[in-house]
Image (cartoon, helix red, strand yellow):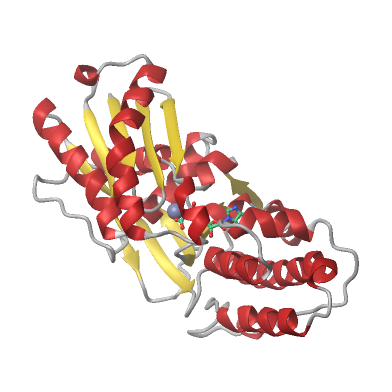
Amino acid sequence: MNLLAIETSCDETSAALLREEVDGTRLGSCVILSQDVHRIFGGVVPELASRAHLATLGPVVDQALVEAGLRLEQLDAVAVTAGPGLVGALLVGVMYAKTLARRLRIPLIGVHHLEGHLFAPTLERHDLAPPFVALLVSGGHTMLLDVGEWGHYVLLGETRDDAAGEAFDKVAALLGLAYPGGPEIERLAAQRKSDRFRFPRPMLHTANQPGPEQYTFSFSGLKTAVRRAVEQSADLTRDRPDLARAFQDAALEVLVEKAAAAIEATGYSTLVLGGGVACNLALCHAAQSRLTGQARVVVASNRLNTDNAAMIGAAGLFRLRRGESSGPDLEPRADLPFPGLARDRTPQGITP
Ligand code: KG4
Ligand code: ZN
C-alpha cells in the first residue's frame, strides 16, 4: 500500500510517501519546506502561513512523488493533519487531500497532529511498541502520556499555560534571538561561562506527590523570571549565554523529573520523547542519565521530531489498518480532540 501524507498545521509545508510492507513501514520520501517568512515577524503569522501552504503544497507533493519514484495513480490512500493547528493552514492540506482522494477514489484519513508526533519514532525504530511513557513537547503542546497500547492513551499531565517550545521561543525573543528560539537557546546555552543565574523550577515540587497536579507543567512564571533578569542585566551580550543556560536547565529539569516520576509510577521501561523540543540534545542526555538502569529513552532524529508529513503518515497507516477512514465531510479543527485519550490522569502502569 502506498500512502501519501500531508502536513500543513503550522509553518511547515510537508508531504511524504510511505509504503506498507510485510516487515514494516518504509519511508519512500519526506519533503519539508519551512516557511522562512515568519522569521521577519518573530513568530508565525497565520494568514501568511495559509498563503504559503497554498502556493507550495502542490510542488511539495510533486517533489515527494518524484523522490519516491511514484506517480499519483499509484497511490492507495491519503493521510492529512486535521488538527490541532492554525485552521486556515490546516484547511489548505485538508482540501488538497480531500480533492485528491475523491479524484483517485482512494481512502482518506484525517490525523491528529500529536498522534503523529507520537508515531514519529516508529519510522526509525521498528521495534518500538507500547507500553511506554511519552513526553510530547512542541511549540503548541506539552503532554505526558501513559501509552498502554497504540490508540489508547492516558493523559497524565499537560501545561497549564505556555507549552515547552513556546517558552523556548518567548525566552529567545527576550534575549533578542531569532525564531524559532529552541535551537538558538540550545546553541547559546552550550556557551555558558558562569552559573551566576538560577531560575525557579515551576511545579517541580509536585513531581513526587501523587495527585491531580503531579504531572502538571507551567512555564509562564519561568519566562517572567527570565524577563526580569534580562531587564536587570547591565551587559546582555555578556550575560546572554548564561541566561539561556539557566533557563534551559530549569525547563529541562522539570520535564525530566516529571517524566521520571511517570516511569516510576507505571513501571514501564521506555520513555519516548517527541515534538520539536525533543531535538534538544541536553533534554535527551538529561533524560538518559536520570533514567539509567530504569528505562531506555527513545527519540526520533531531528527531521522527524519537528513538524513533518512522515509522522502523519505513520499515524494514518495505523488508523487505516484499524479500518478507520474519514468521509468527504472531513473538516479541520483547531481544537481537534486527541483520539483515544482518557483525561483521568491516573497512570495505568503494568498490571500484575
Ligand atoms: O513540533 P514542532 O515542530 O511544532 C509544533 O507542533 O509546535 O515544534 C516546534 C517547537 C518550537 O517551539 C521550537 O523552538 C522547538 O520546537 N524546538 C526546540 C529545539 N528545536 C526546536 N526547543 C528546544 N531545543 C531545540 N533544539
Ligand atoms: Zn508539531
Q: Position of residue 233 (x, y in %)?
A: 80, 80
Question: Which corner quadrant of the figure contains ligand 1?
Answer: bottom right
Q: Which residue is drawn at 49% across and 46% down?
A: 36
When the figure is inspected, residue 114 is found, relative to residue 233, above or below; the finding is: above
- Left or right, 285 with respect to 60, comes to right
Out of 136 and 213, give the one closest to the viewer: 136
Which residue reaches farthest front?
40
Quadrant in the rendering for residue 24:
top left
When the figure is inspected, residue 139 is found, relative to residue 81, above or below; the finding is: below
When the figure is inspected, residue 123 is found, relative to residue 7, above or below; the finding is: above
Q: Position of residue 208 (x, y in %)?
A: 64, 81
Q: Where is residue 119 in the image (x, y as percent from the top left)?
A: 44, 45
Q: Which residue is drawn at 43% across and 31% down?
A: 30
Out of 99 and 147, give the one closest to the viewer: 99
- Left or right, 305 with respect to 111, comes to right
When the figure is inspected, residue 332 is found, relative to residue 237, above or below; the finding is: above
Number of numbered discs on residues:
0
Q: Quadrant of the N terminus?
A: top left
Q: Which residue is drawn at 68% across and 68% down?
A: 175
Residue 294 in view, yes or no: no
- Left or right, 217 with respect to 44, comes to right
- Left or right, 332 with respect to 275, comes to left
Residue 28 in view, yes or no: yes
Out of 79 and 64, give the one closest to the viewer: 64
Out of 272 and 329, give the one closest to the viewer: 329
Quadrant in the rendering for residue 65:
top left
Q: Where is residue 209 in the image (x, y as percent from the top left)?
A: 60, 85
